[in-house]
Image (tube, helix red, strand yellow):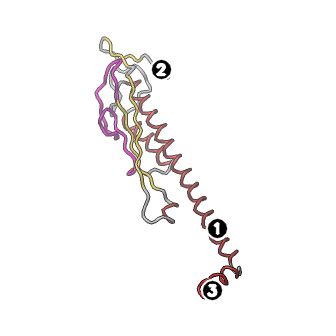
Amino acid sequence: MKFKNKITKVLKNKKGFSSIEIAIGAMVFLIAVCGLVDLTSVLRKLNTMSVQSSYIARTVGRQGGLKPSTPTNYDDGDYITSAQLYSNVQKSFNMSGVPDTMWQATVNGQILSPSTSLPIVTYGTEIPIKITIKYNWGLVSNFIPGRISQTKQSYRTVVSSFKYRNGNFITDYKN
């Protein structure tokens, strides 16, 4: 009985409860704001991954492959070399907050780099594209123990629109 009376007395004494409620509410609000900031950052990174996989697919599909230098018989003056393509993708990821060590692109099974050389394939051949990124939930990790990191992949398959005729390169698709 004494214990019940003590608990009843403590619960009736409401001094300081509003301070505790404000502190708990502020913590919940802070966690929610940090979650929204992290979510915005993650969505920007995932959007960049999607845009870059489409960019790589369009470029490789139009050219029929990827070489470190412009092929000699290539008619089109705007051939994008593997170094240019890698640099463009790298800049886009860096602007979105994804460092070089946190993303990787593969084209037809080969890792995209400034020296990537893919064989030129003709019209109608499928070329698979895959981009993998790793990202961290930076602010939310301050409230939840451990480092929250995840990996996401984007897949594209492009059909080459490139034709090779009589020793000359011909592309059907122009930007």
| Mark 3 / mark 1, whichever is N-terminal | 3
Return the residue at label 2. 174
Instruction: Please name the amino acid that badge 2 sits on.
Output: Lys
| Mark 2 / mark 3, whichever is N-terminal | 3
On whether residue 126 falls in the magenta region, the answer is yes
Tag in front: 2 or 3: 3
Return the residue at label 1. 26
Extreme front residue here? Answer: 1
Q: Secondary structure at mark 1?
A: helix
Q: Is residue 49 above or below residue 8?
A: above
> 10 Å neighbourhood of mark 2: few (<14), some, or many (≥20)?
few
| Mark 1 / mark 2, whichever is N-terminal | 1
Q: Residue at x 35, y 18 (%)?
A: 124
Instruction: Please name the amino acid that badge 1 sits on.
Output: Ala
In this rendering, position of residue 107 left or right of residue 22? left
Return the residue at label 3. 6
Q: Secondary structure at mark 3?
A: helix
The x and y percentages for residue 89 are 44, 40
How much space separates mark 1 and mark 2, taking CA atoms? 56 Å
Q: Residue at x 35, y 28 (%)?
A: 70
Q: Secondary structure at mark 2?
A: loop
Tag in front: 3 or 1: 3
Where does the magenta region start and end? Answer: 101-127
Instruction: Pick the residue in front: 167 or 99.
Output: 99
The x and y percentages for residue 99 are 43, 51
Tag in front: 1 or 2: 1
